[in-house]
Image (cartoon, helix red, strand yellow):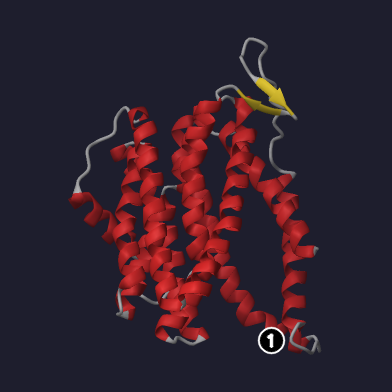
Amino acid sequence: LGVAALGAGSQIVYVVQIPFIAANTEPHQRNEYFSIWQAIGTTTALVAALAGGALAPAAATALGLHGAAAPYHVLLAGVSVLAILALGTVNLLRSDPPVIAHAGEAVRSRFGLFISDRGLFLRLLLPGFITSLGAGQLIPFLNVFVKGKFGLDLTALNAVFAITSLGTTLAFLAQPALARRFGRIGSIVLVQGCSIPFLVVLGFSPVLWTVIGAMTVRNSLMNAGSPIFDAFVMERVSDAERATLSAAMTLLWALGWTVAPIYYGQLQHYLGFTAGYAVDFVTIIVLYTIATSLLWHWFHDSDHAAGRQGPADCAVIAVAALPADGPNLLEHS
């Protein structure tokens, strides 16, 4: 019940964050703002995970708390304190008035949801839903895959995932420059398309260091376009529709992550570890390819100043997405 309440509250906040940011930034600021916002979130989560894992057991001992659950009691108490502090900063924000659809707009309103162009909503939502069907098969079980395939212990596994987290942060910060060079959709399609070969290496390479490198680059590239896409979709719909679109994006992403693990579980049950993951990775590659192709097909004309990209651009971006300090970081999947 506690997890369900926390999840519901988090999603309610997330749904209105993107429209709020869009309403309080200028169009020329949004690429950088959304990218910095997500980069800060990723970095904060990594630092908090490392600090919490190191400090919580010591704090529980110092407070005289015993038992396996004691560190979690300390962590949840700390989360509650930080949440109250965060709520205090929200009071410093300038309140924006409710957005009302203009009478002249052909807007359909049901249950307070505004959709003026259902076809546009479908085109904006479908690639993300297809992507979520792929991500939901892989990301929740990626640690199981790496541990099972290479026999890593918990410390080594944490070190592997540290790499991908910092790589993703750097990719977030680099994406606005790519958007200026290739256009928003061009930059998103470029990084997502370039991530697919690394997904092949991740799924089928028998060498650990190549898997670590591929996982770092793939995760960095696949996630890099997320803040740019958020900025893009908020400008494709009216102010009255932004919250509806944001809610639909969040709902479909969660739905994909609910359905996909069922498929993954059936593969593991009937095919076993190795064959199950092989089919799983092939499925993910197909889904990512379809989602990226649809995004380009439907929206590439919106990039008025987009350049042309070729295989060389993929190589440059893949190198840029690697963390500068090499393989000693960790992701919080």
177 or 115: nearer the viewer? 115
Q: Which residue is at the far top?
A: 104
Please state the horizontal and vertical placement of residue 238, each as a whole percent of the image.
57, 24
Which amino acid type is marked by label 1?
A: Ala
Please state the horizontal and vertical placement of residue 307, each as a whole percent of the image.
24, 36
Q: Is residue 326 visible?
A: no
**Number of residue marks:** 1
The answer to whether 157 is drawn above or below residue 281 in the figure is: below
- On screen, residue 89 versus residue 330, left or right, reads right
Q: Is residue 313 visible?
A: yes
Residue at 35 percent across and 49 percent down: it is 289
> Residue under circle 1?
58
Please state the horizontal and vertical placement of residue 73, each as a whole percent of the image.
77, 76
Residue at 72 percent across and 34 percent down: it is 95
- On screen, residue 230 versus residue 176, left or right, reads right
SS assignment at label 1: helix
The quarter of the displayed image where residue 195 is located: bottom left
Residue at 46 percent across and 65 percent down: it is 165
Badge 1, how many Cα within 10 Å: few under 14, some, many 20+? some
The answer to whether 175 is drawn above or below residue 236 in the figure is: below
46 or 274: nearer the viewer? 274
Please state the horizontal and vertical placement of residue 99, each as a whole percent of the image.
68, 25
Residue at 46 percent across and 72 percent down: it is 162
Split into 4 quadrants, where in the image is the N terminus?
A: bottom right
